[in-house]
Amino acid sequence: MARRVFLSFVEEDLDLVNLFRGQARNKNSDLEFSDYSVKQPYDSTDAAYIRSKIRERLRAAYVTICLIGESTYRSLWVDWEIRTSVEEGNKVFGVRLHSSSAKDTTPKALTDLQAPVYNWDVDAIVRAIG
């Protein structure tokens, strides 16, 4: 049975996110990745609907990985996804897309939750997924 992983990220990092997905799948073909690429502002009129759809995917996941790029820490959606993941009982951790804490600022939700944050090391990340 596949391990479902929810990916939380910002749209501008999509190319690196897709590279991450491919590398992780090559290491463990039992991984199934899910996300809800949100292009709507957090406070839009569609926000409640979007949150309900994201929550469905979070409930179906075992772990949530926040893929941290240069602007991820500013995203209200990422913050909400991380905090909601914990509410839903998911294991949560972060991965720096550039393996640099200076370049990839950790989102406040990960810091508040004292969640581990890893550099981009696919072997270590696949082990962390469990």
Image (spheres, rainbow, N blue to C red):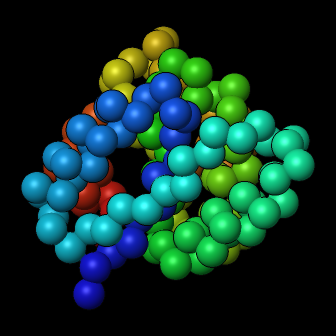
Q: Residue furthest left?
A: 26
Question: Residue 3, relative to residue 73: is it above or below?
Answer: below
Q: Nearer the viewer, residue 20 or 63?
A: 20
Q: Residue furthest top?
A: 102
Q: Residue at x 36, y 62 (%)?
A: 33
Left-right relation of 59 to 103: right
Left-right relation of 4 to 112: left
Question: Residue 92, relative to residue 19: is it above or below?
Answer: below
Question: Residue 57, relative to residue 68: is it above or below?
Answer: below
Q: Residue 38, image x and y in percent? A: 62, 45
- Quadrant placement of the N terminus: bottom left
Q: Kindly tell me whether residue 93 is visible in this rendering.
A: no
Q: Residue at x 15, y 68 (%)?
A: 29
Q: Residue at x 33, y 31 (%)?
A: 15
Q: Residue furthest front?
A: 45
Left-right relation of 91 to 47: left
Q: Residue 113, image x and y in percent? A: 67, 50
Q: Kindly tell me whether residue 84 is visible in this rendering.
A: yes
Q: Nearer the viewer, residue 8 or 18?
A: 18
Q: Nearer the viewer, residue 14 or 100?
A: 14
Q: Residue 97, image x and y in percent? A: 37, 29
Say which quarter of the image contains residue 48: bottom right
Q: Nearer the viewer, residue 119 or 5?
A: 5
- Quadrant placement of the C terminus: bottom left
Q: Residue 42, image x and y in percent? A: 79, 42
Q: Residue at x 40, y 34 (%)?
A: 14
Left-right relation of 31 to 14: left
Q: Give the number of callouts.
A: 0
